[in-house]
Amino acid sequence: MVPCNFSCTVDWEVHSQAFKQLSRFQRIGTSKLIHNLSNTNRQNKLLYGQSDLCPGCGENEETFEHVLQCSHAPTALVRTAALSGLEQSLIAIATPKKVSEVILGGFRDWLDQIFKRIVALAHLHLVQFVLMIC
Ligand SMILES: [Zn+2]
């Protein structure tokens, strides 16, 4: 086990075994996710000069984190449906209930932590702004 940047450890042997079971297409997508290289409008702006705005809310830069947190109702519905789909897939492959709870709970906690960091950062910027005008 090797410590990662997120106060957890990664079992690289298990990671390697799981990764090798993916198709070539799945490996490419998974690698992009792991290395934060998923295509977003942030990249499209950098590479092609297109708008970096989120196509859902149209108000924020579309980064991978924003995709996971966008509050635009249709986007949030897709995210909720994806979590339900994951839950159904875990049931379909007879994943033990405790394991499913850990996977789904971990995913929900992870999304919540991203949201809290974004809120904390927004508060920090607000405090800095207030200090500047005082
Ligand atoms: Zn958005």
Image (cartoon, rainbow, N blue to C red):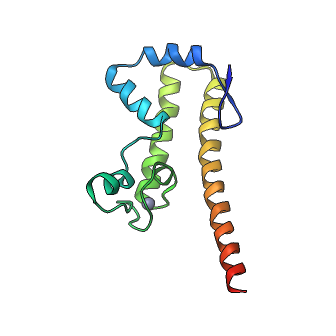
Residue at (65% x, 55% y) in the render: 117
Out of 91 and 111, give the one closest to the viewer. 111
Percent across and percent down for residue 90 are 52, 26
Q: Position of residue 5 (x, y in %)?
A: 65, 36
The residue located at (32%, 25%) in the rendering is 25
Residue placed most toward the observer, 58 or 86: 58
Ligand 1, image quadrant it occupies: bottom left
In this rendering, would 108 be left or right of 48? right
Q: Quadrant of residue 31?
A: top left
Residue 94 at least partly seen: no
Q: Vertical placement of 51 versus 47: above or below?
A: below
Q: Quadrant of the N terminus?
A: top right
Q: Where is residue 6 in the image (x, y as percent from the top left)?
A: 66, 38
Q: Can residue 3 be seen in this view?
A: yes
Instruction: Kindly indicate the quadrant of the structure image that contains residue 82.
Output: top left
Residue 124 place in picture, x, y as percent? 68, 67
Above-or-below relation of 27 to 104: above
Residue that appears at 46% across and 19% down: 19
